[in-house]
Amino acid sequence: MAILLNVYKNLGLHLIESRDYHKSRFYLEKFRVYEKKNDIAVLSSLALSAYYLKDMAAARMYTDEIDNKKDQIYLFNKAFFGIYEKNYGSALYHYKELIKIKRDVRGDIVTKVISFLDERKAEYPCEIAYDFAIGFINYYFCQKHMGSHELRKFIKLAKKRPEYHEMVCFIKNDIFPKDKRKK
């Protein structure tokens, strides 16, 4: 049975990479029927499959099933849902939580998240919170200079839009604070 479970899991994870979301979800669900442990790779792949299959309720459900609420996948997903649902305070909260676990955030995950967010930005160019997300992730986890540039661009676009006020304040106060010595 263990060999069959590994086949289901590996096949499901492979199919997610080839963007066959229906089959990926099928095999990963078969894996979950027999394997009751909380497997973050499986749950995150199921959440991604559900998202691409336009089943946001299931994508949220799979994310919420992740036991470790301080796991990078959980936090990245919850931050995305905050943007998707236009709950920018929630998105910001989850991004700030990522700073607390910065040393545990893996580069391969960061690359995948930025790629996913780039796709969403291309799909929804009017949603500038994706600029914040990409800038934030680059600044803290990847390319600080590029992140800084993207966050400054976000401030210019968002400064007069009240829905992004918390994000703008965070950037101004925590990332680019004015020099306290200047008076």
Image: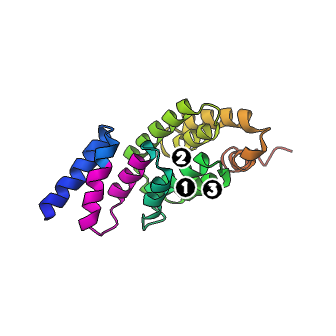
Q: Amino acid at mark 3?
A: Ser
Residue in view at x 73 percent, y 33 percent: 156
Total marks in image: 3
Image location of residue 145, percent across then percent down: 56, 35
Between disc 1 and disc 3, whose residue precedes?
A: 3
Disc 2: which residue: 140
Boundaries of the magenta span: 25-50
User: Pointer 2 and pointer 1: residues touching (CB < 8 Å)?
Assistant: yes
| Side (left or right) of 30 relative to 67 | left
Asked if the stretch drawn in magenta spans residue 68, the answer is no
| Mark 2 to mark 1 CA distance (whole Å) | 7 Å
Mark drawn on residue 90: 3
Q: Amino acid at mark 1?
A: Ile
Q: As rendered, which of 30 and 47 lies closer to the eye?
A: 30
Between disc 2 and disc 1, whose residue precedes?
A: 1
Under tag 1, what secondary structure?
Answer: helix
Disc 1: which residue: 99
From this viewpoint, is residue 102 visible?
A: no
| Mark 1 to mark 3 CA distance (whole Å) | 15 Å
Quarter of the image with the N terminus is: bottom left
Q: Amino acid at mark 2?
A: Tyr
